[in-house]
Amino acid sequence: MTTTSIGAYRPLAQAKLEPEIWRYLRDGDDGQNERAFAAQRIYPRPLCDLRGGHTHLDLFGQTLAHPLLLAPVAYQRLFHTGGEVVSAMAAAAQGGQMLVSSLASQPFSDIFAAGRLDNGTAPWFQLYWQGDRERSLRLLQYAIAAGCSAVVLTVDAPIKLATMQLPGEVTAVNLEVAVQPEPTFQGSQVFDGWMAQAPTWDDVTWLRQQTTLPLLLKGILHADDAARAVDCGCDGLVVSNHGGRVLTGAPAAIDALPAILRRIEQRVPVLLDSGIRNGRDAFVALALGATAVLVGRPAIWGLAANGALGVAHVIRLLRDELEMTMALAGCARLADIAPHCLVAD
Amino acid sequence: MTTTSIGAYRPLAQAKLEPEIWRYLRDGDDGQNERAFAAQRIYPRPLCDLRGGHTHLDLFGQTLAHPLLLAPVAYQRLFHTGGEVVSAMAAAAQGGQMLVSSLASQPFSDIFAAGRLDNGTAPWFQLYWQGDRERSLRLLQYAIAAGCSAVVLTVDAPIKLATMQLPGEVTAVNLEVAVQPEPTFQGSQVFDGWMAQAPTWDDVTWLRQQTTLPLLLKGILHADDAARAVDCGCDGLVVSNHGGRVLTGAPAAIDALPAILRRIEQRVPVLLDSGIRNGRDAFVALALGATAVLVGRPAIWGLAANGALGVAHVIRLLRDELEMTMALAGCARLADIAPHCLVAD
Amino acid sequence: MTTTSIGAYRPLAQAKLEPEIWRYLRDGDDGQNERAFAAQRIYPRPLCDLRGGHTHLDLFGQTLAHPLLLAPVAYQRLFHTGGEVVSAMAAAAQGGQMLVSSLASQPFSDIFAAGRLDNGTAPWFQLYWQGDRERSLRLLQYAIAAGCSAVVLTVDAPIKLATMQLPGEVTAVNLEVAVQPEPTFQGSQVFDGWMAQAPTWDDVTWLRQQTTLPLLLKGILHADDAARAVDCGCDGLVVSNHGGRVLTGAPAAIDALPAILRRIEQRVPVLLDSGIRNGRDAFVALALGATAVLVGRPAIWGLAANGALGVAHVIRLLRDELEMTMALAGCARLADIAPHCLVAD
Amino acid sequence: MTTTSIGAYRPLAQAKLEPEIWRYLRDGDDGQNERAFAAQRIYPRPLCDLRGGHTHLDLFGQTLAHPLLLAPVAYQRLFHTGGEVVSAMAAAAQGGQMLVSSLASQPFSDIFAAGRLDNGTAPWFQLYWQGDRERSLRLLQYAIAAGCSAVVLTVDAPIKLATMQLPGEVTAVNLEVAVQPEPTFQGSQVFDGWMAQAPTWDDVTWLRQQTTLPLLLKGILHADDAARAVDCGCDGLVVSNHGGRVLTGAPAAIDALPAILRRIEQRVPVLLDSGIRNGRDAFVALALGATAVLVGRPAIWGLAANGALGVAHVIRLLRDELEMTMALAGCARLADIAPHCLVAD
């Protein structure tokens, strides 16, 4: 394999994908997350003894080889015929974790089986609210039955913008029916249509009671919401601006992270999603206090370019870069990565 | 109608307009207002219950469906043969308000009739000072007789720069004669010519006594002037840098808004003009304290591209974006939009 | 004359000049001064009564129609066959002042005669130190005999970089011989060659005693030097970074102005040179405390494009823009232009 | 020689070099160092008496004509057949010092002989750790035997990224064998492979005991490491981000300098490497407290373009620019260059 940088997979993916699918993948990426990461500066700390260093971590009792999780990207058969199954194979081969979207284009049971780690740990399930509690519960129970090991409720994308017409053969095969806003005879399509299909804090409290699996909320950017999620009994958070795809002008996830961590005072792990493009970005997120990071578009570039091998290679490159950055910054273990590794503003 | 974004109307308008007219429309837009809006970041606040949310407001006793007013753009027949009348029809169809320019290219009575809302509310009249009190009063009385429901005195453009030669068939049909500075034999053309035609604070006090309609001043950027306007008995303000067209290097209107609001302490409503390009911008203006916003160039793009349907569609797109931004930011009503919705500097 | 903006003269000049001469004129203009001006924001202040407003000022007992002085540009016959004489005619026709360079390409007496105002005021003389006191004194006395009304010693360009080979017919006709560094057998060409030809503070003290005309230093950027100049008996200062031509990376003149003004506490007038491109820039400089400004490249664009008419038109356009900016900012006289006219940082 | 600016050597070098070698030379130069230098502003201070000014300095008992040292660039025969020997000749001809890389492509003894100054001072030796103490000591002793006058241990590049396949005839002729990480059967290639080959603080303490020559550490960016190096008995530091080549997103060397100098309180000299492109940059580094600077890429541009003459000319141009900047800033000697020469933030 001659590609030696993650960025090199981007044009390879673009060359393989139909323009409309490429645009759908790129959509919302306005460079804001990237600029926020680039503004951070890492101190080199030479001459440290780093023998035995590693990137292992324990997360919700699951032992992972590295803190680079595959983000829950929908409809992965758009990007490669192997779909979510080959992404899961790649994640498992690299000893890492994957989040499987409610909008997966293959059966949960197949994906969870492919993503099971040698130590038995299964992938996580990303739940999109299904408009009401009954349907949401059925989907949750279906995913639990298929073997997921944690549940991540996405809360930041109540409105699904149909930015692309899906090809007929790519569908959300695990859903009962596609969620469509009910036609409303009066009131606002936004407030009384789409948003009425979205979950509320009451639903989070209810959902917490439906499973003993670890429950995370994905899409938190405000410290008040982070604190409320913990108070509701959530086991973790994913700070995310959905890769810039939902609310134009939301803060960069990495910029929102510090205030959230100050507020929740290490009561639960906080993961960082949105904008991770290389191992240096992952280091920055960990230095600012994230326990792990989610990787979205780069893994899909690998998937589109070269299927399972591409995804695995992207994960490997990210981990190599993370290890080199750690080594140059004098960090032998993830716990050594701390705010003092960065130049203060 | 396949255009689904406001920005897409810009090239459509450019393609329809003569280059000279396009340049006149674009003139002064140096991107400063746009950059000031882009610098603001909005917190997503998921999981709120937003049922029954709406964008209605009451302004000077007028019930409006949304806070997106059409700005008083001169000579609208330059952009579409339907002129101000079709803009007014579109505003009314969308349940919103329109400001009709002193330099309208069609009779006030026709425009006001076209813009009357179902609840009977008529458009507002934008008054350019006519060089002296007698002529200004006659114009005001003419507009009142034609049925306007509020008066907005524009104070920031005393010097009318002739940036374009108007086509013969487009004229300010409601004016007695075009205001021309008197030739001056000594003194400065600026100070003793153009500025002698402009209104003063004494004229504002006088004007206040000529009508019981709501009176607003448009073109305020300094807090001292805002306070003085309120002291003069004005019922509202429009913070504006005239879209950047008058004083090069004036502050962005959105940047000037907070100091003005602090000074006048909610004694009167403050509207924001200049730089609104999408519903997100409107949300930012409301979060910083504006009661409503004026929309200029985007509506004219719609007018040029597709007449009444274009204007109505632009207003609808703006309102949809405003509603989506409100929903994502956890705001069900305009009153919920507050400074804490934005990331503090 | 159809050109209605100063900037439009720039390409006209470029089209008329040999590329080498154009590069020489442009040299050192790295946009820093321009960016510093653009960063300042002016408050519009409508509704003021400005009748009788004007831009007149009294400077060293000289009544000038406006505060826009022509900067001392060398070798003006490079740009137009009429040379300094036509620049001086234009300045006088517009009721303003001109600084005549030691490196003028025409006799002082001709230039001073052409630049004499109706009220009898003659141009100022810009003195380049001539390597020693004797030669400098002879040049000074020659200029005084020719009729100059003030002396401006340029202190910031001790090293004259030969960036261009002058055409044979353009010479510094008023100098005895061109100043050439003596060949040095040991030591540094910079420290013992060029700099040994430059004036020192002792020379300034000596020079002060050689004339009763107003004496200014041009090229001050540090507050300590400003204070020392006043202590030496200088009557005024010109804050300047020589248009960016001498020390790469010197601060913008406009950025250096406030600290200088705080230090010298209005003991002498301070003029601002470097970066004035329009009347708005002049307003900013005056608002920050400058008494007047020097205009270099824009006037030369006018000279190259259209001789005396071009220079006069550029001055007129600058004054019109200054008057309009004053009017929009609510200033009827130069004394009304103050820091509160600008948005504080 | 008609080239009169350092920057003009860049395209000359690019034209001479194979594209792969050019890319290798340019690699890592992301403009960050350059932007950090450009942000600094120097005050012109005219009217000072600067006769007898010079750039001489004494460094570790060595008298140098100027503070512009050649940085230790590896494999210089890649850029010119004359290799390190002609660079050393040029440095000596200009009265300055050179650092000779462990990865020099010619024998140390030849290079040191070529670089010996008239006053007998020999070049410095840059030591790359050779994986263990025995091999590192043999290399050190070999360099000392060849006549080096100081030792600079590079600590910031433990991982040598093979960014280019070397041509067969260019090798590190002074090394016993190329250092290759041992294959590891378990553990991380980064932590247990490459980094196990890197020196530690214990090795620095040990190295200090192996020679009485001045010992410097190169690659320090954190004040804690600077203090520790001094505590270990090091005689000097080179603040460097390795020209941006090692850790993407490390701080600019010039930005890291002030905190380091505050910490070590002038106990040892601190040199600045990374980003020096002209004499103005050197002045800025000295004003911020560096004793001398290292010049890398510009000298190699000169080497590639014109061999020894090119290197010598680049050094001469740098020194001329440094002298002119000193003269314009009112500094006659290096000791006069101080923080007050720069505009404070």
Image (tube, coloured by chain):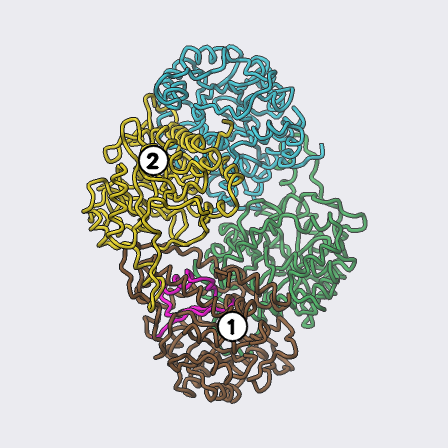
Chain colours: A green, B cyan, C yellow, D brown
| Viewer-nearest of discs 2 and 1 | 2
Q: Please name the amino acid that badge 2 sits on.
A: Asp
| Residue lying at 57% horizontally and 13% vertically, measured from the top left | B107
Return the x and y of residue A4 as percentages of the image width and height.
66, 67
- Can see residue A145? yes
Residue B102 drawn at (x, y percent): 51, 18
Choose between A150 and C265: the one closer to the eye: C265
The chain letter under disc 1 is: D
Quarter of the image for residue C86 reads top left
Query: CA–CA distance between discs 2 and 1?
Result: 54 Å
Residue C287 shows in this picture: no
Q: Which mark is residue C110?
A: 2
**Residue D310 x, y percent position in the rendering:** 51, 68
Residue C239 location, quadrant: top left
Q: Is residue D229 left or right of residue A117?
A: left
Quadrant of the rendering where the C terminus of chain D is positioned: bottom left
Q: Subunit of mark 2?
A: C
In magenta segment, residue C248: no
Please give left or right for residue B148 compared with residue A140 in the image: left
Disc 1 packing (10 Å; few <14; some 14–19; many ≥20): many
Q: Which kind of residue does numbered mark 1 sit on?
A: Ala
Helix, strand or loop for disc 1: helix
The magenta-colored residue range is D268-297
Answer left or right for D278 relative to A201.
left
How many numbered marks appear?
Answer: 2
Q: Are marks 2 and 1 in contact (CB under 8 Å)?
A: no
Between D257 and A93, the residue placed more toward the observer is D257
Residue at position x 60%, y 27% in the image: B21
Q: Quadrant of residue C247?
A: bottom left
Q: Which residue does the numbered mark 1 point to in the structure image?
A: D308
